[in-house]
Image: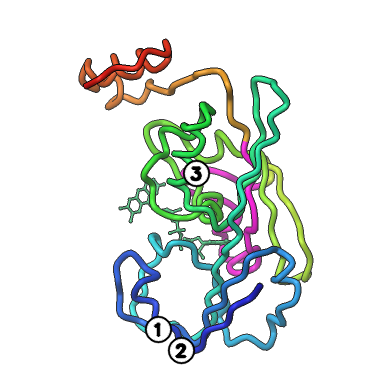
Amino acid sequence: MIKVFDDFDLSARNTFRMKVRCRKFIEYDSAKDLETLDFSALPGPVLSIGGGSNLLFSGDFPGTLLHSRIEYVKFFDLGLEKVPVAVGAGVCFDFLCAKMCAEDLWGLENLSLIPGDAGAAAVQNIGAYGVEFKDIMTGVSCYDTVLKQKCSFKREECGYGYRESIFKKPENKGRYIITGVMLELSRKPEPRLDYAPLKAAPAKSRVLVEARLAGIQLVV
Ligand SMILES: Cc1cc2nc3c(=O)[nH]c(=O)nc-3n(C[C@H](O)[C@H](O)[C@H](O)COP(=O)(O)OP(=O)(O)OC[C@H]3O[C@@H](n4cnc5c(N)ncnc54)[C@H](O)[C@@H]3O)c2cc1C
């Protein structure tokens, strides 16, 4: 379903809490919704917004902001060590990290507490404590606003570098709307503790991690 808001207040939609408005704000909850939009009729520029934590509005936005409410998390657990997980672009990334930890699936734990949505994570190649989004993702699903059709990219096609991807390139600005990401998590506990500040973490934290790996519940 699509919801359209005119002259929309963005103050709760950007983490700087800038008191700004946009001409049009559109929320959608499926990739199919995007196919029904007439992009040429929307006030431009047309830009995607996730949690608004990496955007700084210096004034009212004259165009259209698109916001994903595609919020599924689907597991493809075949009893193997690697577990593919499909995630909608509108899922809160930190919620996803917590969910994977609760499911005993390894790979995202170092990225806990990074603000924003899963779709933007694929744009930004977010990273923390020696792990980057690209290390866990296998592909993205998009809507191509130029060819007006769905498309997908494998990890190696996304041009990932430090906080970099093809989706950030000026020539692609606004072209690809990310609708979902495909991840591969691991059932095998493989904590990444090689990042220098983690190595220097207090012994207590390391004992907690090791106890968790051994299945021991510590009361602290
Ligand atoms: C306190 C704080 C701590 C942070 N810590 C880290 C950190 O440790 N590591 C790190 O890497 N980053 C960090 N960041 C940056 C931020 O969390 C990331 O850049 C995050 O990916 C932004 O997500 P968002 O949903 O808020 O994106 P937004 O700010 O809404 O958008 C970011 C960009 O992605 C585009 N975009 C958003 N959704 C889509 C979509 N569905 N399709 C296509 N394009 C889209 C937007 O157009 C924009 O260009 C931090 C930010 C804050 C405020």
Q: CA distance from mark 1 to mark 2?
A: 6 Å
Name the colour scheme. rainbow
Earlier-in-chain disc, 1 versus 3:
1
> Residue 159 or 211: which is nearer the viewer?
211
User: Is residue 77 located in the magenta-colored stretch of the structure?
Assistant: no
Q: Quarter of the image containing the N terminus? A: bottom right
Q: Quadrant of ligand 1?
A: bottom left
Residue at horizontal 65%, vertical 43%? Answer: 74
Check disc 3 and report its element: helix, strand or loop: helix
The kind of residue on which mark 3 rests is: Leu
Which stretch is magenta? Answer: 158-183
Q: Horizontal and vertical percent for residue 26?
A: 57, 77
Comparing labels 1 and 3, the label whose residue is closer to the camera: 3
User: Which of the labelled discs sits on residue 118, or is there none?
Assistant: none
Which residue bears the numbered disc 3? 96
Earlier-in-chain disc, 3 versus 2:
2
Which residue bears the numbered disc 1? 21
- Among the 4 quarters of the image, the one containing residue 134: top right
- Looking at the image, which residue sits at the far top? 214
Circle 1 residues within 10 Å: few <14, some 14–19, many ≥20: many
Q: In the rendered view, does 56 fall on the left or right side of 174? A: left
Does residue 136 lie above or below 52 as drawn? above
Does residue 95 lie above or below 185 as drawn? below
Q: CA distance from mark 1 to mark 3?
A: 29 Å
- Among the 4 quarters of the image, the one containing residue 80: top right
The kind of residue on which mark 1 rests is: Arg
The kind of residue on which mark 2 rests is: Asp
Q: Horizontal and vertical percent for residue 142?
A: 69, 58
Earlier-in-chain disc, 1 versus 2:
2
Residue at horizontal 40%, vertical 70%? Answer: 13
Residue at horizontal 35%, vertical 13%? Answer: 211
Which residue bears the numbered disc 2? 7
